[in-house]
Amino acid sequence: MELFTISNILAGCDSEAAADAIRRVGGMLAGFGYVRDDYVKGLLERGEAGGQVRNGVAVISAAPEYDRYIAAPGMVAAAYPEGVPWNGADVHAVVGVAATGEILGQMTKCALGAFPDGDAARNAAAAGDAEALFAAFSSGKGAADVSHGSSS
């Protein structure tokens, strides 16, 4: 199973509340087969306070007690041209991560390092180009440490 591909990016999402954005990326993680539905409950319980935010990107993963609901490691992203209000900031990409240990840290670092600043994240989201977003996430800090191909 692929950890992260261009098909894991949903571009052009309408602005929504943080909880709805979390629900969206959780649904994507489940839809791609990375997690079972109970993992999505863990994302929602953690909420926006449980996410990490940098340069217009919010990254969310469930608490460790939900790790048993991970079927395979993976990452998804939803891009919001108008932004999502997230703990007092606007983010333009919400990234859901299903992984444990070192790979969780590497995927989070990669996603958070995708853009040099919030303006770059906003511009990329506004362009609505999943390929460009994929390239940004694939070249983020830590990308060399994360295989975007097979998880096996």
Image (cartoon, helix red, strand yellow):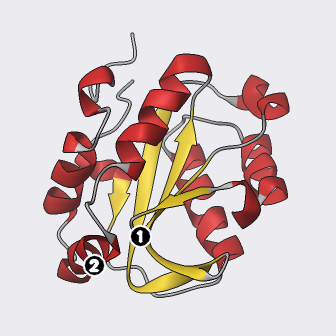
Query: Could you classify mark 1 by the number of other residues whose Cα lies within 10 Å: few (under 14), some (14-19), or many (20 or more)?
Result: many
Nearest the viewer among 95 and 34 is 95
Q: Check disc 1 and report the residue beneath it.
A: 56
Describe the element under mark 1 as helix, strand or loop.
loop
Residue 100 in which image quadrant = top right
Disc with the residue nearer the chain's start (2 vs 1):
1
Instruction: Please give the label number shown on residue 65.
Output: none
- For the C terminus, give its image quadrant: top left
Q: Is residue 110 shown left or right of residue 83? A: left
Residue 50 x/y as whole percent = 73, 54
- For the N terminus, give its image quadrant: top left
Residue 128 in which image quadrant = bottom left
Residue 33 x/y as whole percent = 54, 36
Rendered residue at 39%/65% (across/down)? 55
Nearest the viewer among 77 and 139 is 139
Tell me whether the residue at label 2 lies in contact with that at label 1, contact meaning CB atoms closer than 8 angstroms: yes
Task: Inspect the image, locate mark 1, and give the three-letter code of the amino acid beneath it.
Answer: Gly
Rendered residue at 42%/65% (across/down)? 78
Q: Is residue 87 shown left or right of residue 137? A: right
Q: Check disc 2 and report the residue beneath it.
A: 119
Residue 101 x/y as whole percent = 61, 19
Measure the C-alpha gap from mark 2 to mark 1.
7 Å
